[in-house]
Image (cartoon, helix red, strand yellow):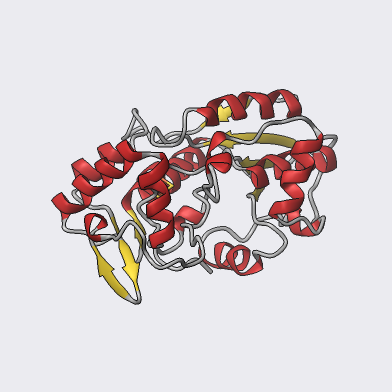
Amino acid sequence: MMVEEGQTIAVWFSCGAASAVAAKLAIQQYGNIANVRVLNTPVLEEGADNQRFRKDVGNWLGVKIETVTNPKWPENSAQAVWDKTRFLSGPFGARCTLELKKNARYAWEKDNHADWHILGFTADENDRFQRFKLTERSNVIPILAMYGLKKRGCFEILEKEGIRLPEAYALGYPNANCRGCVKATSPDYWNLVRRVDPDVFAARVQTSRDLGVRLVEIHKERVFLDELPTQAEQQSLIPSPDCGFWCEEPAGEPS
Ligand code: SF4
């Protein structure tokens, strides 16, 4: 990548392991010539431990992680977005990601310039990377792929550095996104939410019933959350994609 002296690189840190390592590599590789800014768009529905992780990662990186928000939604609450817009998620994405991630980034881009963007696309997520390049910004550096790093490798780096991952991973979540992510359709994912975050599950049941959205997919049939059997047939834990800019991808099956 032809990063030139004096350019600005925006690293979008999602409080996940991959984007943490991406930020570290960006600073190592380009920090001596470019202005590397590490940016986070927090969502209230993420686990509280994400903030501890963000602090630990900031200390590790030696930079201040900046908060980017959509001024229209000062409380950064996905629930507030769903309640006010009366829209949860559909085939083209979730309203919360549009408002709290994508539009937050657009708001930041209005007042700030980035020559390059870096996200936590891992080496095996080339399709997501290409999609983002095609539909969002072409000036993206696939830094984890440049180092051949997949998610496991990112976990190992953080482990070695003594940085404890956000609690969500230990609970069995595939990422540190919002608990009860409305882009998820997997029965196993939602049964995990029911087990480890019963209050969140109850809240999603209520909101999805109110808005008439069948969030779970069982054998290609959509059902309401409260119709999901506790012992749903075991499928792989299909998560929603990471809610960095993965959020901006359509809902449903991850790539
Ligand atoms: S992680 Fe899920 S619930 Fe949270 S903002 Fe992204 S799409 Fe919405």
Residue 121 position by quadrant? bottom right
Question: Is residue 206 in view?
Answer: yes
Whether residue 55 is situated above or below residue 199 in the rendered picture: above
Measured as percent of width and height from the top left, residue 47 is found at 46, 33
Q: Is residue 143 left or right of residue 238?
A: right
In the picture, the quarter occupied by the N terminus is: bottom right
**Image spot of residue 143 (x, y percent):** 75, 53
- Observer-nearest of 28 and 206: 206
Q: Which residue: 27% across, 69% down?
A: 222
Question: Hey, which residue is sitting farthest bottom in the picture?
Answer: 220
Q: How many marks?
A: 0
Residue at 28 percent of width and 39 percent of height: 79
Instruction: Please tell me which residue lies in front, 141 or 232.
Output: 232
- Asked which quadrant contains residue 62, the reply is top right
Q: Is residue 89 above or below residue 110?
A: below
Q: Is residue 246 left or right of residue 179?
A: right
Q: Residue at x 75, y 59 (%)?
A: 145
Residue 14 in sight: no
Q: Residue furthest front?
A: 231
| Position of residue 211 measured from the top left corner of the image (x, y, whole percent) | 16, 53
Where is residue 192? Give x, y as percent.
43, 49
Would you place residue 247 above or below residue 155 in this image?
A: below
